[in-house]
Image (cartoon, rainbow, N blue to C red):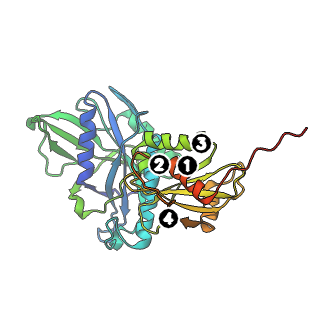
Amino acid sequence: MTRSTIPNLVLAQRVIDKMCAAASRFLMDETGEALVGLIVPGTHTNGIPTLYVLDTIAPDESAVREWGTFQQGDDRQDEIIWWLQENWRIYREQKLDKDGRYLLPKWDVPLRYLGDWHKQPGFMIQPSQGDLMTARNWLADPSNGMDFLLAPILTLGYSPSDIPETADPTFITIPQSDDTSVRVDFWYIDRQGRDFTALRPSVYPNHLLPGLPDYPWHLNDESRFHAEYDLLTRNGLFTALVLWDADGTPPLDVCLLTARPGADQAVVLVTPWNYPQQPPHARVAPVVDIQDGDDIFTIFEELWDTSHPVADPPGWVWSDGRRLYDYLLALEDHLGIEAAPPPEDKP
């Protein structure tokens, strides 16, 4: 965007719905979530770009939520954003959306982090001075790669008489079941701005904007993932997680590269995004040497190129109650994969 251009703003209805649902869970404390979407150049809007907000991503349980205080930005949020961006990149390459329909050229732009919304106490409808300083510091840091931030503010408990009538509102109101309304004010700041600027929002039905893929199982069910991962490593297996386009069709697959010490073959356990509802499958490749400091993605790519798929062991039947380690043991037994025996003690 140019130095002086204030963008248009469009949000999917699902974003507003998720904001209200999140705010209702933390009535007495501040809360908030990250926003992702697209920046579409102003080819058909007199040169004015448009921000399209497609989703909002909740933090994990490490978020600090108190009256007057909210802090987010955990690893899980970053991983979800990366997941969405990588799948979006593949959608663009294939010129298809997540439902397999033609992706309009208008949407052929990168998916980006756009900023954060948060709920403030009382009827404080604009960012605080603390929010302003945080935004300025964030934008001044070149490592963040951002030249603007979107910062909607959500407040609760409005009666109909509390909402001013205006011909060009920079906020929306959402009626609630208790006869009050949620109010969301939309604010924007870029590197050249000294303060936040109010934006006039438009909310579109979900079907008019691109959808994003569901989150993968290892982020949706972290307790299961940690249990599965720990079971592999506790039994002496080198184990590494890599997200990979295993079948040429997004969403990406969640792959676990496993190898026993001294074995001559490594096993890649490939799980679909909705594992364990869908079963895993496997590939086998010659073991490659991995040194400290090696990039695991590069190693995995090399190994994948030399791998081949293997059929499930005879008699193997997948069920939700089984674990990846069970599957691996059956594969190793069928394929004759064994760890090297420990060296004998010399007399």
Which label belongs to residue 194? none
Q: Earlier in the sequence, mark 3 or mark 4?
A: 3
Query: Disc 4 designates what residue?
Result: 246
Quadrant of the image occupied by residue 92: bottom left
Name the one closer to the observer, 260 or 28: 260
Looking at the rendered structure, the kind of residue marked 1 is: Ser
Marks 2/1: CA–CA distance: 18 Å
Residue sitting at 51 percent across and 46 percent down? 140
Query: Disc 2 designates what residue?
Result: 79
Q: Is residue 231 left or right of residue 318?
A: right
Residue 335 at x, y = what percent?
A: 60, 60
Residue 68 at x, y = what percent?
A: 34, 27
Q: Is residue 194 left or right of residue 232?
A: left
Looking at the rendered structure, the kind of residue marked 3 is: Thr
SS at mark 1?
helix
Which label belongs to residue 143? 1
Pick the quarter of the image with the N terminus: bottom left
Query: Disc 3 designates what residue?
Result: 233
